[in-house]
């Protein structure tokens, strides 16, 4: 994709499309999704989104949020210090 692609305006009539129900939408030009498709499918998550996949328990997240407005940076600092401490212990 190049910058030219990003500047194109969609010709889709979004208002008309949003007013349709599923039965009114023509899917004839879209191939059916078969079991074989799903067996071969690979989930690809863009790197920025992948960074958000760590699930933090609600009480832990709440504690970090209460410590600082920059709670994400604080979580990263704590994790980095943990890693550095583990590296120091294994080096001995």
Image (spheres, rainbow, N blue to C red):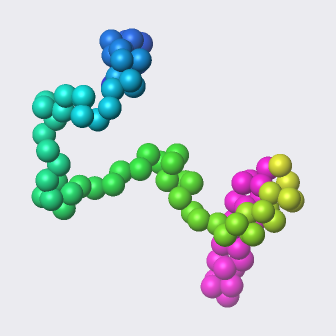
Residue 81 seen by the camera: no
* Residue at x-position 81% and y-position 65%: 63
Q: Is residue 81 magenta?
A: yes
Asked whether, in this view, residue 20 is left or right of residue 56, the answer is left
Q: Considering depth in this image, is 75 or 37 the residue closer to the camera?
A: 37
Q: Residue at x 77, y 55 (%)?
A: 71
Question: Percent position (x, y) of residue 67?
Answer: 87, 59
Residue 15, position in %: x, y?
41, 17
76 or 30, nearer to the observer: 30
Q: Using the rendered image of the protein, determine whether residue 86 is visible from the camera's viewpoint.
A: yes
User: Which of 44 and 78 lies nearest the eye of the viewer?
Assistant: 44
Q: How many marks?
A: 0
Q: Quadrant of residue 32?
A: top left
Q: Position of residue 57 (x, y in %)?
A: 67, 69
| Residue 6 among magenta residues | no
| Magenta extent | 70-92
């Amino acid at each position: 994709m190049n910058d030219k692609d990003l500047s194109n305006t969609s010709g889709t009539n979004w208002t008309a499309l949003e007013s349709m129900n599923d039965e009114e939408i023509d899917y004839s030009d879209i191939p059916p999704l078969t079991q074989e498709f799903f067996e071969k499918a690979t989930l690809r998550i863009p790197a920025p989104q992948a960074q958000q996949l760590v699930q933090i328990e609600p009480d832990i997240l709440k504690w970090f949020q209460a410590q600082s407005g920059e709670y994400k940076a604080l979580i990263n600092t704590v994790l980095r210090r943990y890693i550095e401490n583990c590296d120091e212990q294994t080096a001995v």
